[in-house]
Structures are given as structure tokens and as C-alpha cells.
Image (cartoon, coloured by chain):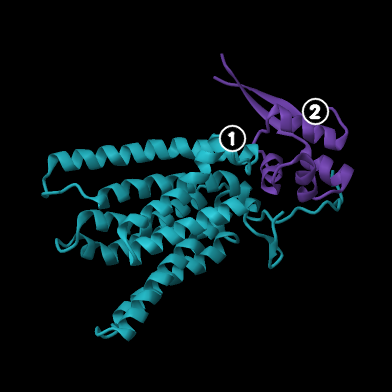
Chain colours: A cyan, B purple
Amino acid sequence: MTGLVAGRPLPPLPALVAGGLVILGLLLDTFVADGFLVVAGLGAFGPGILRELGWLKDKDEFQRQAAYRAGYHAYLIGGLATICIVSGLRRGGRDIEVSSEWIMLVLLVLWMTWLFSALLAYWGAPKTASRVLIVFGSFWAVFFLAHIVGALIGPEPLQLSGVLFGIVLVGPFFTLAWTAVRWPRPTGAVLLGVAVVLLVIVGPTWASDSLQLPSVLVTATLLLVPLVASGIALVRIQRSQGSEADDSEDPGTPKAVGA
Amino acid sequence: MSSRHEVRNHVRRHRRQLHDITQQELADRVGVTRQTILAIERGRYDPSVGLALRIAEAFGVAVEALFEIDQEEGP
């Protein structure tokens, strides 16, 4: 049994535990010691392994099919990304060195492809886009709040431009999460536009030699992929599927039947 | 000459007009999530034979009354 929060069912216990492990692992890895990333790995991949072993049966057939299909998509996109990175590393045109950041980039591409594909299959584009935007918006909000708090208690003065950039970056995530379920196609177009604008604004900084290439690619993936993937999924919705946006409980009360 | 098969279903009509139950109630009866019932009703997911039979059993009808093949001639 799952409890209710604001009238909505809580996520199943395995999902809560897995999510908790991922967050805990990332926090421990960031603030305590590098090796704790393995805890996040247990949260990310552990439940799937347990399901394949038959020890965890928390998904119905539709959810399993969505997960399998997402796994294939992750294999295709992750494989392509890995080939491109290996090809670039071998070429070595920019004195690229193999580092854990490159492996993190591949993991990020794998995970994000899997996540988007599974959620799109399960929820449909509007609800997926809305929830993904909220999650990534929250992620960036926490990131910038930590930056502000760090500046307030640390020796470095708080840069107003940094705060404004944070608002400009986080604002669209939450605003468009709200509009995605109401006006999916226009929201999709706006999301793609926001991605282009962000690329134009931040692109020159990313292109500067002072930044490590894998770190730039990880940031770009985290920042742009949610916007672009959600935007494409929403724009591709056909007009006839507009009602797909509303997947609230369909009541059993019969309606008048037309001709 | 090939043909394309699409499965059409009448789950939503049976649920709403004949049985007056919610998606959640049907989902609970057949042991899946509400999102799965929603996906079936909207044609985004064709259920397995087992689930189709469980839904038919929940409505007390033959599975053919709920699902039919919509065959289109292809090129």
C-alpha cells in the first residue's frame, strides 16, 4: 500500500529507496569522499537488477515494456555517444585526456536517454515534460541556492549577475512545466527556443579554453537535453492527441452518448 | 502485398457506459496501474493476452468484445 500526499499516491517504496540512495550517494560523493558514488549507482541500477533476477516484482507489464524499450534506446544513444567520444579521444586533436568525467558523461547520456524514453512511454509527452522540467528546475534551483549561500557565508562577494542568471535559468523550467500539460505544442516550441537562447548565451563561455571539455559537455547535457527532449516530444504531439495532456482520473460516471 | 494490423479496443466504452467504474477501480481489479489502463484505452499500449483476458473477465465478457483487429491493406 502506498500513502497519499495531497491526494496523490506516493511513489512505490522501491522507487523511494532507489531515489534516496541516488541522492545520498551524490551528496556523500560531493561532500565526504569520492568513492561514495557507488551508493548512487546502487540506487540507479540496483532495482532493475533485482527485477531481472525476479526478486523484486513492483512493475506491471506496461511498465516493464516501457523499461525494456528505454533500455534499447539507451543502448543506441549511449553507444553512439561512446563511439563519438572514443573516436575523439583517439584523434586527440585537443590534447584530450581520459578522465572519470568522460565516463560520467557516458553514464549521464545512458541514464537520461533511459529515463526520457521510459517516462514518455509511460506517461505520454505532456506529463513527462512537466515532471522532468520540475525535477531539473529543482536541481538547478538547489545548485544556485547553494551558490548563493556559499557566497553569503564565504569570502567571495555575491555576484548579482550570478543571481540573475540563476533566475533566468530556473524560471523557464517551472513556468513551462505548468504550461506543458495545458498547451503542449506551443510549450514545446518555446522550450526549443529557450534551449537555443541558452546555447547562444552560455555557448561562448563553454567554448572558452579555460573549461574542461567533459565538464562542459556534462553541464550542456544536464541543461539542454531536458529542454530539447521535452520540446521535441511536445511539438510532435498531433493536434488530435491534445487531450492526451489531461490524463487525470477518468470518472466512471457515464456521459450522454452522441450519435 | 502486406497488411498492417492495429488492435482497436472498447475498454473505455465498457468501463464507462456499461460498468460505471473508474480507471483506478479497473486497474485494481486486474492488478495493474491506472496509467496502464489509460494507455490501453488511448491505444498507446496493446495488453498481453493474459491482461486482455483479465480485463474481459472483470467485465464479464469475451475478450473479442473488447479487442478487435483493425486490418488495413498496405503497399
- Neighbours of disc 1 within 10 Å: few (<14), some (14-19), many (20+): few
Residue at (60, 61) in percent of width and height: A182
Judged by depth in the image, the label closer to the viewer, 1 or 2, is 1
Asked where in the image residue A196 lies, by quadrant, the reply is bottom left
| Mark 1 to mark 2 CA distance (whole Å) | 29 Å
Mark yes or no: residue A211 visible: yes
| Chain where mark 1 sits | A
Residue B70 location (% of width, % of height): 69, 26
Question: Relative to A26, is A43 above or below?
Answer: above
Residue at (44, 38) in percent of width and height: A73
Total count of labels: 2
Question: Please, what is the three-letter code of the amino acid marked with disc 2?
Answer: Val
Q: Which of these two is toward me, A242 or A214?
A: A214
Question: Relative to A20, is A83 above or below?
Answer: above
Mark yes or no: residue A194 visible: no
Question: Please, what is the three-letter code of the amino acid marked with disc 1?
Answer: Gly
Residue B63 badge: 2
Which residue position is annotated with label 1? Answer: A54
Q: Which image quadrant: the C terminus of chain A?
A: top right
| Chain where mark 2 sits | B
Residue A166 location (% of width, % of height): 37, 74
